């Protein structure tokens, strides 16, 4: 059952942590870490086995430094063992299922409890409050339709911390018209969607959307994108770094010195190729241990993005540690023959919302020409009928992306493997025409 007082309590509690000194934070992290480790060992078969195989007793993990004894886990390890990564205390059908639509093209369901969902909402809101969101501000989120139903009714009724949504799948004209009429104090969206919107507004000379500030996320916001957004809206854009698995990881405050880490709900480590923690100021892969995920714990979970730990302090007064992000999920913008430009997110959302996504092990979209898309699909089960899957997927793609079959050609190819990029990274959406 959803409990709104619980969400408010979580928010209040989380806000009370932002001025903690380092010692108090560490003490709290260690205490919560021990709880999660014991729980995962006891109730989650995947971690029980992992600990056994590595001869780790839960009592060996007393503090953050001990975490390094646990091997690094990747999405792939969890995907392969999806039934075993969920706590035995819950029935899957009672949990909320979130689908990651990250950049790896490998659909990965994440299961959370209602309580965790409330906590995640509070985490999300706290980051917005850092940037100046006030109780009665109207926030408009330019996002995926799958996120649109998540505003608690009571908040809508009271008009506090209230969200409105505009779909990234709407045409750019509709997006502009809807956002104009909603008159947002804060405009939130995927970095690429906000960039596309800003470019269109500039091109059309429209100056009627005037948020006090903007919040971007989901994809790396580079300097070029930031510059366009801030120039067009004449307002600051604050970037937030989050992943579906654990919600907010870190976010910018108005000082923008770095990203304040949600260190009271996550332990974030930065590791080199050998899994060793890097020094302050050096880049390393971000490895995350969640202190609040119990239905599906994330312990020593490598995200694939690169970040830099820093020991700088921030003038904003928030004492949660800072990190910098140097390299993250970055995909190409996708131009269409009818002049639209789509955010790469829209492709991953579209594929992930396919009714038979559970038959897809991995996918990659390559725009070969302006009007030619190649969808590479690796099936989970060899025996699944390709013809049926192909025709259903094609119909879904055309409908969701609002494409006409005579405007673009969609080739669906079934492959045995999708190779990594030269960099060793996996990109799910690639445009070869720029
Ligand atoms: Zn700050």
Image: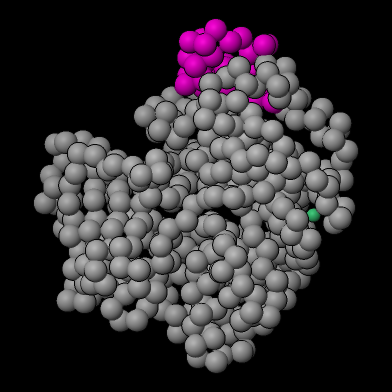
| Residue 254 horizontal/vertical position (percent) | 77, 63
Q: In this view, does 317 lie to the left or right of 75?
A: right
Q: Nearer the viewer, residue 426 or 177?
A: 426
The quadrant in which the C terminus is found is bottom left
Which residue is rendered at x = 50% and y = 40% of the image?
304
Furthest residue in direction bottom, as rendered: 205
Q: Nearer the viewer, residue 329 or 21?
A: 329
Q: What is the span of residues highlighted in magenta in the rendered image? A: 33-60
| Residue 178 horizontal/vertical position (percent) | 53, 81
Which residue is rendered at x = 50% and y = 28% of the image?
73
Visible residue check, residue 304 = yes
Q: Which of 49 and 408 is in front in this view?
A: 408
Furthest residue in direction top, as rendered: 55
| Residue 371 horizontal/vertical position (percent) | 23, 72
Q: In this view, does 265 lie to the left or right of 271?
A: right
Ligand 1 is found in the corner quadrant, namely bottom right
Visible residue check, residue 261 = no
Q: Is residue 119 above or below residue 228?
A: above
Reply yes or no: does residue 9 show up in magenta: no
Q: Is residue 239 above or below residue 297?
A: below
Residue 60, by quadrant, is top right
Q: In this view, does 134 lie above or below 375?
A: below
């Amino acid at each position: 059952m959803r409990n709104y007082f619980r969400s408010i309590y979580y928010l209040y509690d989380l806000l009370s942590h932002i001025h903690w000194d380092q010692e108090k934070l560490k003490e709290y992290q260690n205490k919560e870490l021990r709880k999660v480790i014991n729980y995962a060992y006891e109730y989650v078969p995947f971690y029980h086995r992992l600990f056994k195989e590595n001869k780790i007793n839960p009592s060996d993990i007393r503090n953050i430094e001990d975490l390094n004894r646990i091997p690094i886990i990747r999405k792939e390890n969890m995907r392969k063992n999806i039934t075993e990564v969920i706590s035995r205390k819950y029935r899957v059908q009672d949990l909320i299922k979130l689908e990651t639509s990250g950049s790896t093209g490998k659909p990965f369901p994440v299961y959370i409890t209602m309580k965790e969902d409330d906590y995640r909402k509070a985490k999300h809101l706290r980051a917005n409050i850092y940037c100046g969101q006030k109780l009665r501000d109207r926030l408009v989120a330019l996002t995926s339709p799958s996120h649109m139903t998540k505003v608690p009714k009571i908040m809508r009724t009271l008009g506090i911390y209230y969200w409105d949504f505009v779909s990234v799948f709407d045409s750019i004209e509709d997006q502009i018209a809807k956002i104009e009429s909603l008159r947002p104090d804060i405009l939130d969206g995927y970095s690429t969607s906000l960039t596309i919107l800003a470019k269109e507004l500039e091109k059309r000379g429209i100056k009627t959307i005037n948020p006090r500030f903007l919040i971007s996320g989901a994809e790396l916001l580079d300097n070029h994108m930031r510059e366009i957004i801030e120039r067009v809206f004449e307002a600051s854009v604050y970037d937030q770094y989050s992943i579906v698995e654990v919600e907010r990881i870190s976010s910018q405050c108005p000082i923008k010195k770095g990203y304040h880490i949600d260190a009271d709900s996550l332990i974030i480590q930065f590791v080199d190729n050998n899994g060793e923690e890097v020094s302050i100021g050096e880049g390393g892969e971000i490895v995350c241990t969640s202190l609040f995920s119990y239905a599906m714990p994330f312990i020593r979970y490598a995200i694939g993005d690169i970040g830099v730990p820093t020991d700088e302090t921030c003038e904003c007064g928030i004492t949660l540690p800072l990190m910098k992000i140097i390299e993250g999920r970055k995909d190409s913008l996708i131009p269409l023959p009818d002049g639209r430009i789509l955010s790469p997110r829209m492709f991953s959302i579209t594929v992930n919302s396919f009714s038979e996504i559970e038959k897809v092990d991995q996918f990659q979209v390559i725009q070969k020409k302006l009007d030619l898309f190649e969808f590479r699909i690796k099936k989970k089960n060899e025996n699944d009928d390709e013809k049926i899957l192909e025709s259903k997927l094609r119909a879904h793609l055309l409908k969701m992306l609002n494409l006409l079959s005579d405007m673009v050609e969609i080739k669906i190819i079934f492959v045995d493997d999708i190779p990594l990029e030269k960099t060793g990274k996996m990109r799910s959406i690639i445009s070869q025409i720029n």
